[in-house]
Amino acid sequence: MAQNAVTARAACDYTGGMKREVITRLAGVGRDDWNRVAGTGNPFLRHEFLAALEASGCTGGDSGWQARHLLLRDDAGALLGAVPLYLKSHSYGEYVFDWAWADAYARAGLRYYPKLVAAVPFTPVTGPRLLIAPQVERDPVASALIDGALELAEASASSSLHWLFTPPAECALLESRGLLRRVGYQFHWQNRGYRDFDDYLAGFAAAKRKKIRRERRQVREAGITLEVVRGAEAGAAHWNAFHAFYRDTVRKHGAIPYLNREFFHELGRQLPEAVVLILARHGDEWVAGALNLQGADTLYGRYWGGREGYHSLHFETCYYRAIEYCIDTGLARCEAGAQGEHKLARGFLPVPTYSAHWLRHPQFAHAVSDYLARERQGLELYLAELDGHSPFKQS
């Protein structure tokens, strides 16, 4: 009942001629309205992707991800901005780890959950969290959205508010409002105008280049062929096979299956233009698969799975074929998910990622601020060390 009261109160909140509203399902806002403020360049921010998570039950229900999407409208009802917000009862599926913070709260006799996160569930992909309509004055809209998120955190008795995988400029804006900046890293591939994969490998040191060619040859010699299946071509059999690979990977690593079969089918129906499935076949059977989503200039590698016993098939399916796809289609980048130092040897270089954090308790906020400063120093040293292991020729 208290959460319903919070939602109703936020829905009637006016600020500077703009009305803030909180919705608990994305169906509460039109697809075109949401996509107008979110843009269509990042597939994970699109209405279709977030709605597919809701429709399949991956968010909502007892998932621990309860939508509290913040909307900002003008007096005529036009959508000026939005924030994808979730009330969380745990820290799973975020990829910016705050378990130690939650443990410290518990040891002090305080509750860390619920907390509020501005994020895309289960998706460590950088993108705007302050979604602002084109051709409006950005500063007052951004300020009203930040104010609204902070007020919702207070009203929902959240211990904290976390903006995850924010672009650098957005993180700087949040930091100027008193939030704490946290820096992480991922490994991304950059397209430098390569003509083909051989042209790409030409920039590698000889030993690294030889190793990749050997890995690709081992896949071919095993009799494996790979095919790229775009979303419009993907049928139920493709999605069922991929879901089985995904579940196998989850089981092997003792992880949590955040996504269900229904989600993959729903994704294929709702957002086929973004789907890039890379499937490996041995004889008449698919033996592995990788799911990518394509944005305006980036291929985002998300999930992988495959049968054991095929040497280097993971590298071929997830990295080498994805790189070839980017070269062939002229995409600027390939982002292959969170962490994974093994990506460095394949030409995915470290880049920083950012998040911003507000904690209600002032003493804990001070302690976390000190911790984050030390963490950033350690990360700078680590990234400098990684630079020394680049597979590319040293100029």
Image: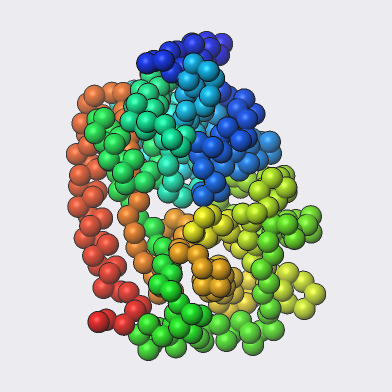
User: For this rendering, which residue is in front, 232 or 392?
Assistant: 232
- Taking depth in this image into account, of 251 and 381 the one nearest to the observer is 381
> Camera-side residue: 84 or 12?
12
Q: From the viewer's perspective, is residue 318 above or below residue 392? A: above
Query: x and y percent of residue 141 in the render?
Result: 39, 27
The outermost residue toward the front is 135
Q: Left or right: 137 with respect to 257?
A: left
Residue 206 picture location, percent across and down = 37, 89
Q: Where is residue 150 in the image (x, y as percent from the top left)?
A: 36, 23
For the point 34% across and 59% down, the residue is 351
Quarter of the image where the C terminus is located: bottom left
Q: Quadrant of the N terminus?
A: top right
- Residue 187 rendering spot, x and y as whole percentages: 40, 62
Q: Is 284 placed left or right of 125 in the picture?
A: right
Q: Which residue is drawn at 23% across and 41% down?
A: 371
Pick the front one: 311 or 380: 380
Name the image quarter holding residue 224: bottom right
Residue in the picture at 40% in, 72% down: 192
Vertical placement of residue 105 versus 40, above or below: above
Would you place residue 342 above or below residue 232 in this image?
below
Q: Is residue 299 left or right of residue 281?
A: left
